[in-house]
Amino acid sequence: MSAENKAHVATANRIAKRYGATFNSGDGFDIELDELIIEVETTATLSNAVSRLASMRGNIYIALTNKDGVEEALKLVENTRLGVMDAQGEIVKPCQVTA
């Protein structure tokens, strides 16, 4: 398993535990609760994730595996409704919910 995969799995499990959810390592969203979707990304996968998630509705967050990724994510989601979380699951930028 690569370092990025280990970071992704560790971050996803940490955030899932915090929110009382389960990390989905298969197809679909990494963490999904009734009204919350969290996709855990590395800096390498961030740009594709923003493109893929930007048009979706609901409470959608991109969580980053490291601090550098958070800064990059904030720039990429600036003109979107997506929210950003750090590797601990702390909300850095709230999402803008659309009906």
Image: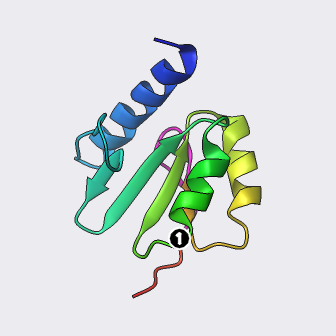
Q: Position of residue 76 (x, y in %)?
A: 73, 58
Q: Residue at x 73, y 67 (%)?
A: 78
Res 92 visible: no
Q: Which residue is mark 1?
A: 95
Relative to 51, 2 lies left or right: left
In-front residue for pair 93/80: 80
Residue 67 visible in image = yes
Q: Is residue 71 above or below residue 59?
A: above
Quadrant position of the C terminus in the picture: bottom left
Kindly identify the residue that appears in the image at 60 percent across and 35 percent down: 42
Percent of width and height locating residue 66: 62, 33
Q: Is residue 11 left or right of residue 31?
A: right
User: Which range of residues does the magenta coloring cover?
Assistant: 85-94
Which quadrant, please, contains the N terminus?
A: top left
The amino acid at mark 1 is Cys
Q: How is the image coloured?
A: rainbow
Q: Nearer the viewer, residue 47 or 84?
A: 47
Magenta highlight on residue 43:
no
